[in-house]
Image (cartoon, rainbow, N blue to C red):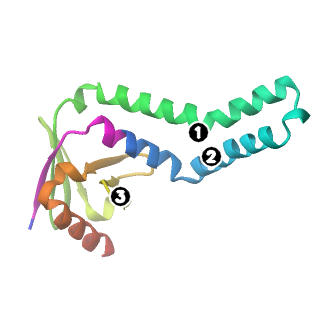
Amino acid sequence: MSIQLDVKLDKKSLSRFLLYHNYARPAGVIGVIISLAAIVALCVRWDFWTTTQRGILVVLALLFTVLQPLMLLWKGKKQLQMEEFQEHFHYVFDEKGVVISQKEQKQEFPWKEIRKIVYRRDAVYVYMSTVSAFVLPKNQCGEQYGSLVEMMKEHKRK
């Protein structure tokens, strides 16, 4: 059995992936903790801090809660403007693995080379390495989404 999908990544799906990818890792969690600690320090000891220290704490508070998410969204927008994201990616999932093609380019990944699969409410993220993944939005998988998830779970258990 094989499952074939044509996916064109959209802004919403890519943005959700970038935010998930960044904040689901230890560095992302630590960044949020640092920002929250700066907010607490500002609120609890406002009179204790000098103007310079307050400024630094405000920057730390905004860094991982506002600035970094905005930078990630900007990065995603720029990425979607690249030529390869203007066309659909064609995916074929079968017993051997995944074949991804677009125009004349084609890549094959056996199931054993897939590093990790993350199942989210609105998409599946298939990691080929710690930093590279392809995003399969649920709304673009249609009725095949359930079968696709079952196939992935079955082959990643082996």
The N terminus lies in quadrant: bottom left
Mark nearer the N terminus (1 vs 2): 2
Q: Which mark is residue 33?
A: none
Residue to which mark 2 is pinned? 32
Closer to us: 86 or 97: 86
Gap between marks 1 and 3 measured at Cα: 22 Å
Gap between marks 1 and 2 measured at Cα: 6 Å
* Residue type marked 1: Thr
Q: Secondary structure at mark 2?
A: helix
Quarter assignment of residue 16: top left
Residue bounds of the magenta highlight: 2-14
Quarter assignment of residue 43: top right
Could you tell me residue 25's position as x and y percent? 54, 53
* Residue type marked 2: Val
Tell me what residue is drawn at x 36 percent, y 28 percent. Answer: 77
Local crowd size for mark 2, using a 10 Å CA cut-off: few (<14), some (14–19), many (≥20):
some
Closer to us: 1 or 104: 1
Q: Is residue 83 left or right of residue 62?
A: left
Closer to us: 141 or 112: 141
Quarter assignment of residue 122: bottom left
Residue to which mark 3 is pinned? 120
Gap between marks 2 and 3 measured at Cα: 21 Å
Q: Secondary structure at mark 3?
A: loop
Closer to us: 122 or 25: 122
* Residue type marked 3: Arg
Q: Secondary structure at mark 1?
A: helix
Does any portion of residue 96 appear in the rendered image? Answer: no
Does any portion of residue 90 appear in the rendered image? Answer: yes
Could you tell me residue 147's position as x and y percent? 17, 67
